[in-house]
Amino acid sequence: MTRPRPALLVLGAGALALVAGTVGVATAGSGMHVESVGARPAVSASIPVAETAPSSPDAPSSAAAPALAGTPYRTLERRDATELPRPDRTPRPVELRIPAIDVRVAVDVVGLDAAGQVEVPVDVARSGWYRFSAKPGSGEGSTVIVGHVDGVDQGAGAFYDLRSLNPGDTVTVTRADDRRMTYQVVARERFDKDRVPLRELFSRSGPERLTLITCGGPFDPASLEYTDNIVVTAVPVDSADDLGETR
Amino acid sequence: MIRPTLGRVGIAAAALALPLGLAAVPAQAADMATVSVLHAIPEGAGADVVDVFANGDLLIDNFTPGTLETVEVPAGTYDLAVFGDGQTPDDAEPVLIAEAVEVPGGVNATVTANLDAEGAPALNVFVNDISALAAGEARLIVRHIAAAPAVDVLAGSDVIFSDVTNPNEGVIVVPAGDYEASVNLAGTDTTVLGPAPIMLEEGTVTIAYAWGSAEQENLALATQLITDLSTGPEGVPAGGGSTTELPVWALGIALLGAAAVVGAGARLAATRN
């Protein structure tokens, strides 16, 4: 059995953790980075403001914002409440490709373990789409795909090289309906596991984005875990062209 | 003109009792409140198009049955009044009123204009439980605001709320997912609504309203969604030794951790309702 990380790196990470103290101040509100490249799109915690639809043809101008002029009230949304939230039939992701690091892996569906943590596929050569996150192409929120950096008895995992991705790199996700969604990396971050902004990273609201998560940093033999999470955020590329194949 | 007594004056106390500190309220919203208004008086009951006023100012214009409007208002005390289309406090008497409704900062509430159990128009105020949800969870709130007798609410064949009467509610936290919802007359197998497929999305409060009139045969469901309340998962253990084999002592520690989390979850669930 080989420990994947030499003990020397623990010292290195200690130094990095000190640096994080200053970096973290500059990024308050988005968790404490150990290190970061690029920036994630901001996610607002407030209720999204929807358009106010005129309710009837005989409501000339008063149905819109002017109705509230001179009052302290602000209309957030008007909607037909008689439509029930129907089951979502959007196809799930089945394959993930990251040409820059020669990754082409199957995407399983994963949920939560008994401790409330995300299940990560036991096979380190596979990845997992967190089933409570957004589906690719849903237009809103974070699509989260997780994968092992490695396994003691399996060697390097699918996401071993996530640490070397950079803003601008291309990521593609293929859905069960064969539709391929293309993303561009905008940020790579490393967080101490106690300081990962999980709520933001997993939020189903805010801009549509792809969030790839694995482990990194020093290996803690007491917990049999790495101390950090590496998080890569990518945003959809307007063109559906398959840019990835040529890289 | 109908001027019903307000049956839910207790609203102020209920609102204040909410654990607001736990609620996912944006910092700047501490002195603001989110209020939704649901028009749940069926067509043909004299309220097909109405205007809603708050403290004499127009709050919602041209409001029609089955519509939900959400507004942000400063915290405070409000006199709500519903007027016929185009009428104002200056030239007409309201159709419905609710006086001195206390709206604390940070609260999320829904006002329903609906029929009471006997079929008379009424205003009810409900405080929405927007406390955070653990990963994988959804909150379902069911409100009886129909001119109809007591009902049971079922998910599949399981009764999740029994003997719910107008204007009361049931609140439950369930695993997020797809359900078949139906409403039966209390204690019977007589289904009056559904079964209807409904998705309870993770981190979302789904409020289902049974509205309309049994006698008029226009009972229906309406829904309101409050999203983005999930705390997210506890973590992502994505590397190292935890793939196939674990020493016994490590497993013991993991189980202790899981037990602690489950215990905390049970305490949370117990204090929610």
Image: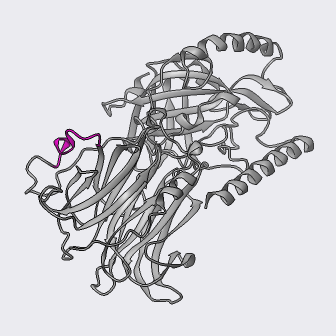
Q: How many numbered marks are there?
A: 0
User: Colour scheme in the image?
Assistant: one colour
Q: Residue at x 49, y 89 (%)?
A: B189
Observer-nearest of A221 and A58: A58
Find residue B138 and report its image quarter.
Answer: bottom right
Residue placed furthest toward the right: B249
- What residue span does the magenta drawing correspond to? A63-73
Measured as percent of width and height from the top left, residue B157 is found at: 55, 79
Q: Quadrant of the N terminus of chain A?
A: top right
Q: Quadrant of the C terminus of chain A?
A: top left
Measured as percent of width and height from the top left, residue B78 is found at: 35, 52
Is B90 placed left or right of A30 in the picture?
left
Does residue B208 sit above or below A29 in this rendering? below
Is B220 placed left or right of A17 in the picture?
left
Does residue B125 sit above or below A205 in this rendering? below
| A72 magenta-colored | yes
Measured as percent of width and height from the top left, residue B17 is found at: 57, 54
